[in-house]
Image (tube, rainbow, N blue to C red):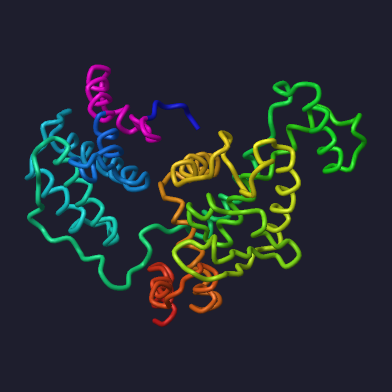
Amino acid sequence: MSERAKVEGIVLIYEPTEDYLNERQLIAYRNHREKLIKWLARQGKDPERLEGYAYDTYYTYANIICQFHRSIWDEEGRFTLDLTHQQADEYLRGLILGDREYSASHLHNAKLALKAYFRFIGNDWEPDISVPSQSGVSQPKDFVTEEERKALREAVLEYGSLPAYAALDPEERREWKQYLARRFGKPMKEVGPEDWSRANGFKYVSILNASLDAGLRPVEVGRAKTYWVDIENAALRIPEKDSSKNKDNWTVSLREETTEYLAQWLSEREMYEKYDSTESLWLTRHGNPYSGKSLRVLLDNLRDIAGIERDFSWYAIRHSTGTYMAREEGLAAAQSQLRHRREETTMKYDQAPVSDRREALNRMG
């Protein structure tokens, strides 16, 4: 992935914007966007209390606002940051009434993002057009297709985590050679730098595959413990004390391939000192539990490797797991796999994607 300047984990200037502006305009917009992103992250939710939005929220809002800017520049035929309420109304109306069909959640986010933007520039705005309600049962706002799930699984196989051979001191190198000798079934004296090239670590591949199978929330990736992993029965056993948003023990099924990745990771994990005093299943390179922000970085890298150009959040993985499980095995299986206490929560996955329904209509004649 190309290196681009970031603020609060968000790319300041994306290629479509960079291609649109000249050098002087880029400087002006870069400074404007940097202030905006910091404001969203640090105080946008409640400026008086200095409370910012959660990462996934301000990431979404910042991207929507950038799209709004480019839309206005196209319409005006020039670069400007002097935007009006009327332009916001027309932009929102275009999303609702345009040829492209947006989900209710996207339209709702667009409205909230623009409201936040006008608060940021000190000119509060209320739209003059109603946005479809998100109330009641609705489909997930994010969705990963079957093809994208497969592409992500393949991409993570290229994403390594072993330390660089040249960065290890002789003692560390000897320990890693012992590990690789066991892993590859060869004498330790035959293990060399070339083995590092084919020994991509199992941390990231186990995180992604476990999340695709179990629909892990970001907080659950951060909370995951080694004792959750049941290799013999190909399952994650999440005890009540570790559960997220509920008070139950859960047993979640895993694919055999995912179980193998987890077994390999548990073995590799013992090589890292940062895990010596913790039962955490996964830690970042800085020794911290994973969060929505750190998982966003991982997902961005995997999407780049997989050639997936559109954006979606880590929660999209969970939503797709629920949808496909409901389709294949029914709501009861989806409820158990996603660890929902209430059936109503799982109901939103009991809806075939629009494309599937359209194909069914075509077959019906």
Asked whether 250 or 110 is in front, the reply is 250
Q: Is residue 358 visible?
A: no
- Which residues are the magenta region? 7-34
How many discs appear?
0
Judge left or right: residue 299 versus residue 282: left
Q: Residue at coordinates 72% horizontally, 21% vertically from top-left?
A: 166
Q: Position of residue 365 (x, y in %)?
A: 39, 81
Residue at left offset 19%, top offset 36%: 74
List the single residue furthest toward the bottom.
364
In x, y percent, where is residue 237? 63, 65
**Magenta region, mostly helix, strand or loop?**
helix
Q: Is residue 119 visible?
A: yes
The location of residue 114, given as percent across then percent down, is 18, 45
Q: Residue furthest top?
A: 24
Q: Residue at x 37, y 34 (%)?
A: 8
Q: Residue at x 54, y 62 (%)?
A: 241
200, above or below 339, in the image = above
| 230 left or right, relative to 190 | left
Residue 277, image quadrant: top right
**In the displayed structure, would residue 247 be above or below residue 258?**
below
In the image, taking residue 3 as reference, residue 47 lies left or right, namely left
Magenta region includes residue 286:
no
The question of residue 21 being in magenta is answered with yes
In this rendering, the answer to whether 265 lies above or below 17 is below
Counting from the top left corner in percent of width and height, residue 254 is at 64, 64
- Depth check, front residue: 252 or 325: 252
Give the vertical position of 153 relative to 184 (above or below).
below
